[in-house]
Image: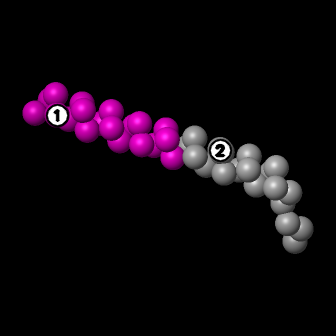
Amino acid sequence: MSQPSAGEQGDFLAEAQLAINDVGDGIVATKQLSKSLN
């Protein structure tokens, strides 16, 4: 199995970071929504 180039690995990490940020935003939005409902 060949090692990915540094550029490919950087792109992968950037994509993963964006996905994590999206999940975090979703969690925050859900918490704010449940607060306003309670």
Residue corresponding to mark 2: 15
Q: Is residue 24 above or below residue 6?
A: above
What crowding class fits label 2: few (fewer than 14 Cα within 10 Å), some (14-19), or many (20 or more)? few
Q: Residue 37 location, x and y as percent?
A: 15, 29
Query: Magenta residues, as a range?
Result: 20-38
Query: Up-down: is 25 above or below 16?
Result: above
The residue lying at 35 percent from left, 41 percent from top is 27
Identified at 84% across, 60% down, the residue is 4
For the residues marked 1 and 2, what is the alpha-carbon distance in whole angstroms? 30 Å
Q: Residue 34's spot in the image, x, y percent?
A: 20, 35
Residue type for callout 1: Lys
Examine the structure image and report whether residue 21 is included in the region drawn in magenta. yes
Report which quarter residue 2 is drawn in: bottom right
Q: Position of residue 22 (x, y in %)?
A: 49, 38
Residue at x-position 33% and y-position 33%? 29
Closer to the camera, 3 or 37? 3
Q: What numbered label is drawn on residue 35?
A: 1
Q: Looking at numbered disc 2 in the image, what kind of residue is underneath it?
A: Glu
Quarter of the picture holding the C terminus: top left
Residue 36 within the magenta-colored segment of the rendering: yes
**Which residue is at the far left?**
38
Q: Is residue 13 left or right of residue 4?
A: left
Determine whether the residue tagged by mark 2 lies in a helix, strand or loop: helix
Residue 4 relative to residue 11: left or right: right
Question: Magenta span: helix, strand or loop, mainly?
Answer: helix
How would you rate the neighbour count of disc 1 (Cα within 10 Å): few for under 14, some for 14-19, many for 20 or more?
few
Tell me which label, 1 or 2, sits earlier in the chain. Answer: 2
Q: Circle 1 — which element?
A: helix
